[in-house]
Amino acid sequence: MDKPKCAGTAPISVELEAGKKYAWCTCGLSEKQPMCDGSHGHEGCEFRPQVFTAEADETVWFCTCKQTSNPPRCDGTHNTIEPAGQ
């Protein structure tokens, strides 16, 4: 798998808690979008989650198309791509 799977065509709102660690899915295979559930662990997948610690309590919009230039936050790229299989 050389490109991430487009897991959605719209961002998902996430409530972050300051000091808490999060793992954003980069491969698009997670069933718990936009967060990682370990689905990248299959053979041949070179993607790993983007792990970060929230700096503040805030609501953010996370990318599900996996093409954002500002991961994990949505930058609107989903408006310019067509998901695989459609």
Image (cartoon, helix red, strand yellow):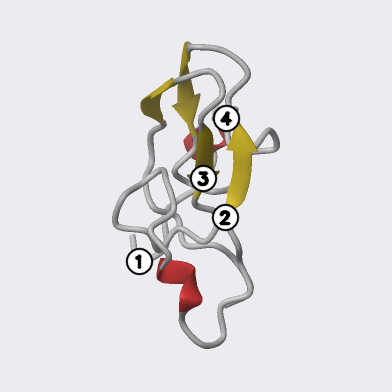
Tag 4, which secondary structure?
A: loop
- Indicate the position of residue 12 as horizontal and vertical percent values: 37, 31
Neighbour tally class for label 4: few under 14, some 14-19, many 20 plus, Cα within 10 Å: some
Number of marks in the rendered image = 4
The amino acid sitting under disc 4 is Arg
| Residue denoted by label 2 | 49
Disc 3 marks which residue? Answer: 24
- Disc 3 residue type (three-letter): Trp
For the point 70% across and 37% down, the residue is 69
Quarter the N terminus occupies: bottom right
- Disc with the residue nearer the chain's start (2 vs 3): 3
Determine the CA span between mark 4 and mark 3: 10 Å
Q: Position of residue 19 (x, y in %)?
A: 56, 24
Cα distance, mark 2 to mark 3?
5 Å
**71 left or right of 28 in image:** right
Q: Residue at x 49, y 11 (%)?
A: 57
Which of labels 2 and 1 is toward the front? 2
Q: Which mark is residue 73?
A: 4
Q: Earlier in the sequence, mark 2 or mark 1?
A: 2
Q: Residue at x 60, y 27 (%)?
A: 75
Sequence-first disc among 3 and 1: 3
Dot 3 lies on which element? strand
Q: x, y percentage for residue 63?
A: 49, 37
What residue sits right under mark 1 in the picture?
A: 85
